């Protein structure tokens, strides 16, 4: 079982199909505008409709029925108030020195494997397609999200939950939990991972420090050739996990992404090794077998996974991510020629 924990923790970001139904209706959030002087540039506002459509530009007029916004690409547009979920002023990091809007990452709550302290917006949901399986994430409440992920084989099956807290100074704190099982392939396997994430930045650029404790429990079978019997016992193991990850916009559609996954070395695993010796008896002409049992200890090795890559926002509700991983496991650097490829899509 030497490689079991590494495999389970590496699949931390995969799970399958649970349908979560939620409502997204609500009153739009409207920010108050400060009066402009003649020398001030016009404020850039972002309007988000109930269906997730976004309009960016300068608000010309607004009343109880509708908003008139002047957008760079579509010109002046009237939007009924009952179709609006949120109206907010663009943050300084979202506006270039020339006044051009720099959109934040729609999928900025995720890197390659790990998450951060930024929340999934209420009513928003997305799917993350990976080469090894799908990952569904749903914004079911204010600063609260649920998810489910798996491999293409449906094992393991993991559910996730995360609550985000906005802190002063462009800081965010996330606390979450992953709970799963081996599903049909490994019904005796249980997984749990409570974690925390501290993020500096916003949806345009951010840096995250995260930590957690991953635990696994499973049944292990051992055959004793001396007694010719097979025994079974339940084994539990846990490791401390750390990660440093970040992303930064390098253009309107291009972002640089870095992720890491660090598993500290575990305790010692005790196991029995059986040695078989044969001796020849010249009198009888037969061979006799002698079996000796030796108890050994082996320390569970640590794992370090580093993943640099890029993310391309192909459409407002779609993105493509590509990167290569470097794996350091049990004191050895292991080449990983298979790329980390991810497709994001809003649901």
Image (cartoon, rainbow, N blue to C red):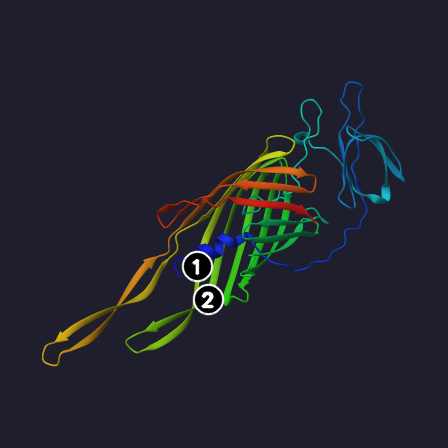
User: Which residue occupies 63% across, 35% down?
Assistant: 204
Compared across the picture, whether 136 is left or right of 271 comes to right
Task: Count the labels in the image.
Answer: 2
Q: Is residue 250 above or below residue 267?
A: above
Circle on res. 299: none
Query: Is 306 or 300 nearer to us in this picture?
Result: 306
At which x and y percent is residue 183?
55, 65
User: Which residue occupies 64% across, 59% down?
Assistant: 17
Q: CA distance from mark 2 to mark 1?
A: 10 Å
Q: Is residue 81 above or below residue 147?
A: above
Residue 257: image quadrant is: top right
User: Which residue occupies 55% across, 52% down?
Assistant: 13
At which x and y percent is residue 238?
45, 58
Furthest-bottom residue in view? 284
Compared across the picture, whether 287 is left or right of 12 comes to left
Q: Can see residue 116?
A: no
Query: Is 103 or 333 nearer to us in this picture?
Result: 333
At which x and y percent is residue 164?
63, 48
Query: Is 267 or 313 nearer to us in this picture?
Result: 313
Compared across the picture, whether 89 is left or right of 283 comes to right
At which x and y percent is residue 97?
67, 23
Q: Which residue is mark 1?
A: 4
Q: Nearer the viewer, mark 2 or mark 1?
A: 1
Say whether disc 2 or disc 1 marks the residue closer to the N-terminus. Answer: 1
Q: Is residue 148 above or below residue 334?
A: below
Furthest-top residue in view? 39
Is disc 2 in contact with disc 1, using a CB cutoff of under 8 Å?
yes
Q: Which residue is mark 2?
A: 218
Element class at badge 2: strand
Residue 184: image quadrant is: bottom right
């Amino acid at each position: 079982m030497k490689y079991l924990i590494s495999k389970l923790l590496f699949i931390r970001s995969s799970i399958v199909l649970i349908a979560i139904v939620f409502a997204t209706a609500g009153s739009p959030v409207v920010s108050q505008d400060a009066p402009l002087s003649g020398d001030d540039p016009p404020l850039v506002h972002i309007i988000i409709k109930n269906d997730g459509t976004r309009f960016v530009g300068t608000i010309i007029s607004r009343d109880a029925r509708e908003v008139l916004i002047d957008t760079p690409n579509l010109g002046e547009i009237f939007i009924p108030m009952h179709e609006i979920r949120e109206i907010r002023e663009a943050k300084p990091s979202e506006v270039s020195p020339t006044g051009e809007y720099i959109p934040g990452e729609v999928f900025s709550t995720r890197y390659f494997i790990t998450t951060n302290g930024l929340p999934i917006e209420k009513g928003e949901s997305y799917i993350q397609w990976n080469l090894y399986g799908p990952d569904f994430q749903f914004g079911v409440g204010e600063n609260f999200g649920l998810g489910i992920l798996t491999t293409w084989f449906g094992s393991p099956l993991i559910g996730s939950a995360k609550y985000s807290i906005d802190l002063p100074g462009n800081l965010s704190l996330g606390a979450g939990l992953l709970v799963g099982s081996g599903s049909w392939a490994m019904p005796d396997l249980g997984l749990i991972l409570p974690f925390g994430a501290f993020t500096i930045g916003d949806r345009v650029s951010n840096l995250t420090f995260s930590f957690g404790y991953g635990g696994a429990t499973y049944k292990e079978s051992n055959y004793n050739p001396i007694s010719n019997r097979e025994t079974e016992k339940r084994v539990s193991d846990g490791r401390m996990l750390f990660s440093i990850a970040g992303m930064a916009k390098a253009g309107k559609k291009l972002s640089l992404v870095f992720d890491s996954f660090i598993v500290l070395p575990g305790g010692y695993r005790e196991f029995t090794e059986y040695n078989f010796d044969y001796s020849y008896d010249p009198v009888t002409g037969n061979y006799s077998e002698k079996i000796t049992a030796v108890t050994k200890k082996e320390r569970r090795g640590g794992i370090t996974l580093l993943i640099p890559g890029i993310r391309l926002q192909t459409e407002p509700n779609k993105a493509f991510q590509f990167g290569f991983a470097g794996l350091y496991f049990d004191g050895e650097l292991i080449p990983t020629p298979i790329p980390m490829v991810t497709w994001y899509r809003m649901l």
